[in-house]
Structure formats: structure tokens, C-alpha cells
Image (cartoon, grey):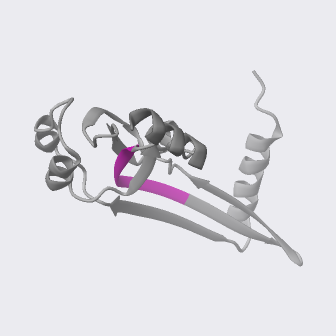
């Protein structure tokens, strides 16, 4: 399978950079944000039936709150503890310059989402990557008509 000219061009750029005045930099970065929820904190949450107040008391403030099914809501907690390595090379070529950059950083933030019904009772929770959890909770907010219909039906 051919990978095309990109690897060859990169190798040529590196070879050229090492043989001419150039700038090579290596970066190592550590990122930590929020605090991961402990297994103990998650084990203390019943899968169904915990109140919103109990969950907030146990877990603290979430990083994201979304509406769910008119009156319900979703709380999303997220944390990241990651390391990445980067390499960049810049080579002057007359009045211009060429550059090449590489990093192994990925979107690795993890999280947990908790779904609550209209009585604000926990109905389920799910672990996963933060980006995936946000995608599954990204629903259209209820319209005024839907809220009025819900109120009319439930009296």
C-alpha cells in the first residue's frame, strides 16, 4: 500500500533541516483538568433512584448540564490526566521557510454522564470519552409547545 509523497517529503525536510541552519524543537506536555471521579464515588451511586441532590452531594458540580426530554436533565462530569510529545522543525529556504510538526496528543478526556427524569431521579449513567458523551447528550431543547403539551397532559 502506497502512503503517497507526504512521508517522503517529511523525510526530505528533516534531512534538509539537519544539514542547514534550522530550528528543531521537542515538547513534552502534561495536561490535568478536573478530578477523576473515584470508583468509590461511582459505586456509592445506585443505578436507579438516586435524587439529583444526592448525586450532586456525592459528585460535586458537573462541567456540563443539558436538558433531557422536556423536564429531565443530563449532568456530564469530565476529567483529563494526559501527556503528549511533540516535535517541530522549521527550515529557512531563502526568503521563505518550510516547517513540519508532529504531536501524539489526542482527545483523551474521560467522563461520565448521569440522566435524570422529570422527577429529577437518576435513571441511568454511562462512562466514556467526554466527546462521545457530549454527542449523545446533544439533543434539541424542548419547544414551548412541547412544554405546554406536557403540562396539559400531566395536569
On the picture, is 21 further left or further right than 120? Answer: right
92 lies left or right of 106: right
Residue at the location (71% across, 63% down)?
Answer: 17
Q: Is residue 126 left or right of residue 67?
A: left
Judging depth in this view, the residue of 146 and 42 nearest the camera is 146
How would you classify the magenta stretch by its main secondary structure?
strand
Residue at 44%, 41% in the rendered image: 151
Q: Is residue 99 visible?
A: yes
Position of the N terminus, as image quadrant, is top right
Residue 128: image location, x then y, percent: 38, 36
Q: How many marks?
A: 0
Can residue 69 be spotted in the picture?
no
Is 73 magenta? The answer is yes
Q: Is residue 74 magenta?
A: yes
Residue 84, image x, y percentages: 44, 54
User: Splitting the image into 4 quarters, where does residue 6 fall?
Assistant: top right
- The quarter of the rendered structure image containing the C terminus is top left
Of 31 and 61, which appears nearest the observer?
A: 61
The residue lying furthest to the top in this view is 1
Q: Is residue 45 above or below residue 15?
A: above
Residue sticking out furthest to the right: 95
Q: Position of residue 23 (x, y in %)?
A: 65, 72
In the image, what residue occupies the spot 15% across and 38% down? 45
Question: As drawn, is 32 to the left or to the right of 68?
Answer: left
Percent coordinates x, y for residue 80 in the rendering: 35, 53
> Looking at this view, is 93 or 76 the one in front?
76
Q: Could you tell me which residue is drawn at 56 percent across and 68 percent down?
A: 25
The magenta stretch is 72-86
Amino acid at each position: 500500500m502506497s502512503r503517497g509523497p507526504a512521508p517522503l517529503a517529511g523525510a526530505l525536510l528533516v534531512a534538509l533541516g539537519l544539514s542547514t541552519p534550522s530550528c528543531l524543537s521537542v515538547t513534552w506536555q502534561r495536561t490535568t483538568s478536573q478530578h477523576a471521579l473515584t470508583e468509590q464515588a461511582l459505586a456509592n451511586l445506585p443505578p436507579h433512584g438516586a435524587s439529583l441532590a444526592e448525586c450532586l452531594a456525592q459528585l460535586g458540580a458537573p462541567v456540563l448540564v443539558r436538558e433531557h426530554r422536556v423536564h429531565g436533565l443530563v449532568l456530564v462530569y469530565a476529567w483529563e490526566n494526559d501527556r503528549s510529545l511533540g516535535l517541530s522543525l522549521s527550515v529557512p529556504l531563502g526568503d521563505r521557510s518550510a516547517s513540519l510538526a508532529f504531536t501524539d496528543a489526542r482527545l483523551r478526556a474521560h467522563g461520565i454522564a448521569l440522566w435524570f427524569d422529570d422527577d429529577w431521579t437518576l435513571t441511568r449513567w454511562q462512562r466514556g470519552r467526554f466527546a462521545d458523551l457530549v454527542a449523545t447528550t446533544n439533543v434539541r431543547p424542548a419547544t414551548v409547545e412541547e412544554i405546554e403539551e406536557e403540562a396539559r397532559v400531566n395536569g
